[in-house]
Amino acid sequence: MRLFKNVLAIAGVIVALSPLAVSADQNSAHSSAVRNIQLGPRPFYLVEDMQKSALKTELQQCSEGPFHKTDFSIGHRGAALQFPEHTKQSYEAAARMGAGIVECDVTFTKDKELVCRHSQCDLETTTNILETNLAGNCSVQPDFTSATPYKNVKCCTSDITVAEFKTLKGKMDAGNRNAKTLAEFLNATPSFRTDLYSANGTLLTHKASIQLFKKLGVKMTPELKSASVPMPFNGFTQAAYAQKMINEYKAAGVKAKNVWPQSFNLEDVRYWIANEPTFGKQAVYLETLDVPEQVPAAIAKLPSLAAEGVKIVAPPMWVLVTLDANNKIVPSEYAIAAKAAGLDIITWTLERSGLLKNISGNPYYYQSVLDGIKTEGDMMVMLDVLAQDVGILGIFSDWPATVTYYANCMNLK
């Protein structure tokens, strides 16, 4: 018997998007909201690659759709498997693939404006800054006396103004730290990704992402990123940073129920709960858990998180699953304890590991179930356990179409 089946489904997870009808609550004023969900061949490929099972048969029967937007499918940095992360094009692709919620990771520029980047200091690998005149602004310059001049190069949003930031172009996140030339450094996209959609990646401020998401008809999950510069930054405190992010949603007229603010910093979550309670009740505490040895302490902390008002925790997906005696994927001790504490769960990140047949070379997201992963289709088995047995609210994915297919087939609501 499944432990948590359909216990914590979000109201309105599946929203039908016919050409004539869009959710009036969110999208009635936005004529460009995505109405035609397109999943492409990948979800079908994964289903066909599954080993024979009742789940495979059930998923095969959904192949003709129709498919609708779902809040269960969260666009991780947009659709970062094939599009430059945190670009307009990546966000649009995520919405087209049925992601009901899309993420802007939030950091700040030299003039304290909020922008969408996964890290304050990743511009050298996620943009073309090193090919521009702004390269001279980078915190750590290439060392041309070294055989590997780009080993330590570092370019931060806090090195440039928001006006300068807007002149950059997004690229696939990659950099060859052992490169001898700039071209070699930049030409480093992992083989399971592609550069086909990286010709003109449009960077966005946080404000611009809100306006785009409103037009696309998606909900929003901003992550307040830890600053790479000492805080306060020229008088900009951590509390002011956390407040400014929320203020930009309020100024844009976005309802708190359509926003899931996130942070790995528990103090940020506490700040929102105390100072912006309507937003704070959907605040997501992201768990930093890299190895199994860290999990017992995280489990022990769960009741105290719930006691101080945290409603949603978000560990990486490997933390939520384990293997039984037959190498079957099942809920982990953490998953059971989180539910017992009354906490909801969101998790990350599907479609970020490359080929599962090569998972031993990139095991992070599957590290607790490696002996249970045999085919690419086992991604769907993992997803099914997280959805039906663990009872997650939603999952971040670098390719939202995969999750959208599953959610529609299972009628998650």
Image (cartoon, helix red, strand yellow):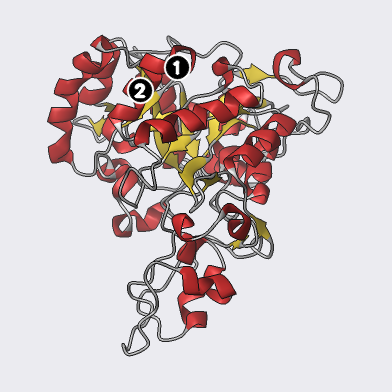
Dot label at residue 276: 1
Is 166 positioned to the left or the right of 289 in the image?
Answer: right
Which mark sits nearer the N-terminus, 2 or 1?
A: 2
**Inter-mark Cα distance, 2 to 1:** 8 Å
As drawn, the residue found furthest toward the right would be 20
Image quarter where the N terminus lies is top left
Q: Is residue 50 above or below residue 155?
A: above
Q: Is residue 394 above or below residue 144?
A: above
Dot label at residue 271: 2
SS for dot 2: helix
| Residue located 74% across and 32% down the image | 215
Dot 2: few (<14), some (14–19), or many (≥20) neighbours within 10 Å?
some
Identity of the amino acid at label 2? Answer: Tyr
Q: Is residue 52 visible?
A: no
Of the pair 317 and 61, the residue shown nearer to us: 317
Where's residue 292, x and y in %?
A: 17, 39
Residue 200 sits in which quadrant?
A: bottom right
Q: Is residue 354 above or below residue 132?
A: above
Identity of the amino acid at label 1? Answer: Glu
Residue 255 sits in which quadrant?
A: top right
